[in-house]
Structures are given as structure tokens and as C-alpha cells.
Amino acid sequence: MLASDLLVECLEAEGVEYVFGLPGEELEDVLFSMADSDVEFIPVRHEQGAAFMADVHGRLTGDAGVCLSTLGPGATNLLTGVADAHLDKSPLVAITGQSGLESLHKESHQTLDVLHTYKSVTKWNTQVTDPGVINESVRKAFKLAEYEKPGATHLELPEDVAAEETDAEPLEPRGRVRRPDPDDESVERAAELLESAEHPLVIAGNGAVRTRAAEALREFVDDRGVPVAATYMGKGALSDRDDHSLFTLDSGENGEAEDAIARADCVLAVGYDIAEHDPENWNPDLDKDIVHLDHEPAEVYEHYNPSVELVCDLSAGLERLDEAADVTCDDAWYREEREAIARQVVDRPDEDDPVTVRNALPILREAMDDEDVLISDVGSHKMAIATAFPAYEPNTVLISNGLASMGIAVPGGVAADLATDENVVVATGDGGFLMNAAEIETANRLGCEYTILLFNDDDYGLISEQQEAHRDAHTGTELSNPDFVSFAESFGIDAYRAESWDEIAVALDETVDADGMSLVEVPLEGD
């Protein structure tokens, strides 16, 4: 068979359903091999959108999403989404085409050193120069992408190699490598720290959601009564309906979660990544005992220097701690903060309250079922969603807080719609929306059904807020925008401009559970 046929058969063996990407001259053999396979190639409007789709697919399913681009500008356009997946610990395999091997030793049209360009944003990447090793290369790319902690890998396939013949066969995927159970000594030391603490606290990070450890975490919390504050990417690991939930690390209009966390003397960090949230924010005085529970040892950092590290499967670690730690935590020390936050996030706005993202979130929450999926773009609205939008199930509120790249929401909605049977809403600002708004065409072409909730302040609002806080003024952030309703309708989707609370409620009620694509624009009045 052709090497490109082997590549695609290897993707089939890995269970790949979709490859998101853009066609290119150097990809001709690969594209025609996919056309004769069970793998569906989904052409998108920009390579960044393709990588974001693969990124969100990996976040939601735990299986590596696959994105494809040609050489040069295709590979560089793909890079941001690949980096986002890598820092967000989302399994992703990127495949890029390349010129023939005979031209790579010299300056050539569109030819860049893609391997070195991708080195810092992947767990592993390689150029395939021999069709006989495609099977091993693909298997390794998926194994490493999906192995804890997951991330991005990259394969570069020169066009002349893709056109060669080979008699190699795909390698059969095996069960994923599992970390061992925690060692007895570390469990005993961790249990002693938790037992001696007056105010123990769990910080649930990205890994608590990513590794499907939510069930074990919920059992531990139910048995031991320890409160939980999630990172933005750990939302939903514990339901925010649970009385032990402090929502996220900085929830509460008056800093209630931060006040409670400040009183904690022992922190059990479950699947916590420093890239998600700087530990200096919750351990500024270096006065907390930290138990690190994750698949890898902790990063070396002054403000995150664990007393004990449990490097193991998260569910197994939580189960062992639940058995070993004689802890029954009284909720008196955090109950007031918990109740204050819980009231704030469900209170609907009064008729004369300003139209802000935070005020709109209770209406959005009411329009969505517990299992529906919300994807947040990056901007000022992300901060409100992270701190004030309750999550009731794991992996139902997706926030990028590793690389935190703008533009993920609209293409992410495509992947989410393909990956889940639940309703999908993507929340974005006017800045992030226009970065990848062309993917509305991709979504509509595929028959996707999700709602774009567009908060419009004609500004890069988060940067303005930061500048105002530092200098009492802002500059370089103001924007002008098209008529978003007409813009969306030009793609053939339904669109609404909702300017009052009644209009917002009606629009969300009509669109979230509706067939087809829709956009709801909400002009903001400021905070």
C-alpha cells in the first residue's frame, strides 16, 4: 500500500473518527487515502480552528483529537491550538505535510523547520522519513498524547514519503498505561497531615476532571466532609450543589472563597497544575501543608512545595486516603462563605440591573441542563464564568487556562457538538468571536446544533479592566464591530440581539435546546 494508506489505517486502528484540517498540495496522497477510509476529514476555514477542534475533542472524550495541516503557513497557523492543548493537558495529535526530502537541505518555497518550531509545545514530535516506521510513529504519538499527563504530539510527513509503498501493518493499540497505587508510607504521612489539620481543604485541578476521578473525589468529600475549591479547569469535579463546594479559588463577589482558603492549614491538591492557577495566590505566606496527589511529581516552586507527594492514579490515591485518614471536618469554618457564594450565583438580576456577564449567568444556568456543555472563550467573560457559573458535572464547563488563547469557543463548539449528545453553548466576547467566526460555516455545513452567546462591549474588555486597575485609564483596546445579527444570518443561522433581561431569557430558552445553529448577541452596559 502507499505510505499515506498506512497512515490512515493506523488512524483507523486508533479509533479516530474525525480529522480536522485544511487541504494542501503536500497532503494530496493523505487526503485521498482518507477519502477511501472510515476516517472523516473535516475541512475547516483556518488551521487554528482545526487545532482548537482537536483540542476540545480531547478534553471531552479523553481520546486524542487529530488535526491536519500542510507545511509552512499551515503548520504555523496550527501551532496556537496545538500549544493550547499542550498547556491545557488535552490529548491531541497534529499531522503536518512537508516538502520532499530532497529539498529540505536548502531554502525552499514555504519550507520551515517545523520540528523545532513544535518542540516546545509538544510532548514528542518527529519527521517520518521511512514509510516502514509509520505504524510505530502513529502508535507512539497516540500513546504519549493520551498518557497522563496528556498533551500534544506531532508527526511531519514529507510528500515524497507519503507516496512511497510499504508492506508495514498498523500496530494494535493496547490498554493505556496506568500509574501504580500510592505507596503505603506516603499515604500514611498524608493521612497524618490531614488528621492534624484544623481546616483541611481540597483544591480540585484539571486532573480531577481529566482523569475521570470525580467519582472518587465525591466519595472522599462525602465521607470526610472536607471542602473543595476548584481551579477554573477543575469545575464540576465536585458538584457546586454540594454543600462542601466553595466553587472556584476566587469565587464570591467579595472574595468569599479566598477568605475561606486563607484559613485552610492543609491543602490536598488533586490533579492540580501550576499552569492553571498560580499557587502564590492561595499560599502567599507559605504557611500551608500541601499534599500533592497527581500522576507526576510536583513542579518545583516556592509557593508549592508539598510536604507529601502521592504520585499515582488519582482515583486510587483518593480511595486510599479515604480509608487511611480519620478525618471528619466540621463545616462551621467555611459555611458562611459557601452560603454567600451559593446565593450570589443563582440570584437573577433585577429589571433595572445593568446588563453584565455576571448578571446574565443565572439566566444562562437556568436555560441549561446539568449535563449540557458550556465552552468559554478567553476574555473578561471567562473570569465571570469561572467564578460565578455553577458546574454540576465534570467536563461540562470547559475553560482554557493553560495557554488561555482567545478564539477557542466557536471552533470548540464544533468538536463538542460532534462528541456529545447534550446541548452545547459557547460563550465568547466580540474580540475572540471574530478571531474564528468563519468556523460558523464549518459548523453549519456539518449540521451542528449549538448556541453562540456573544457578549459585546466593543472592546478587549479584560485588558481594559486591568489597565483601569493599574492606571485609571485604558488605551489600545477599543474596537468597532459589524452588525453581528446580520453577520450570523449571512451564514444561514438564526440570530438575535437581546438587550433586556426578558429578551435574554427568552432568547436563551428558545435557542439552547433548539435544532440548528444560533447566535445570541448581548450588548453589555459595563460593570
Image (cartoon, grey):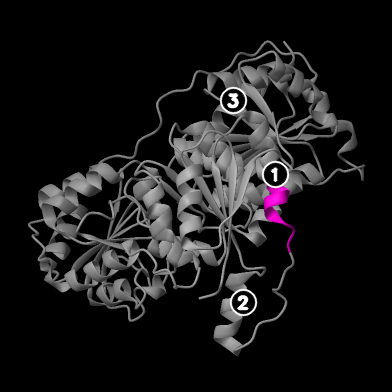
Q: Residue at x 67, y 68 (%)?
A: 458
Q: Quarter of the image holding residue 190?
A: bottom left
Residue under label 2, please give it: 464
Residues at marks 1 and 2 touching, judged by CB atoms closer than 8 Å: no
Q: Residue at x 56, y 37 (%)?
A: 415
Name the kind of residue labelled 2 in the image: Ser
> Any magenta on residue 484?
yes
Q: Earlier in the sequence, mark 2 or mark 3?
A: 3
Q: Main secondary structure of the magenta part?
A: helix
Residue under label 1, please give it: 489
Q: Earlier in the sequence, mark 1 or mark 2?
A: 2
The segment highlighted magenta reads 481-488
Provide the secondary structure element on which disc 1 rests. Answer: helix
Residue under label 3, please give it: 136
Answer left or right for 330 relative to 458: left
- Crowding around mark 3 (Cα neighbors within 10 Å: few <14, some 14 to 19, many 20+) is some
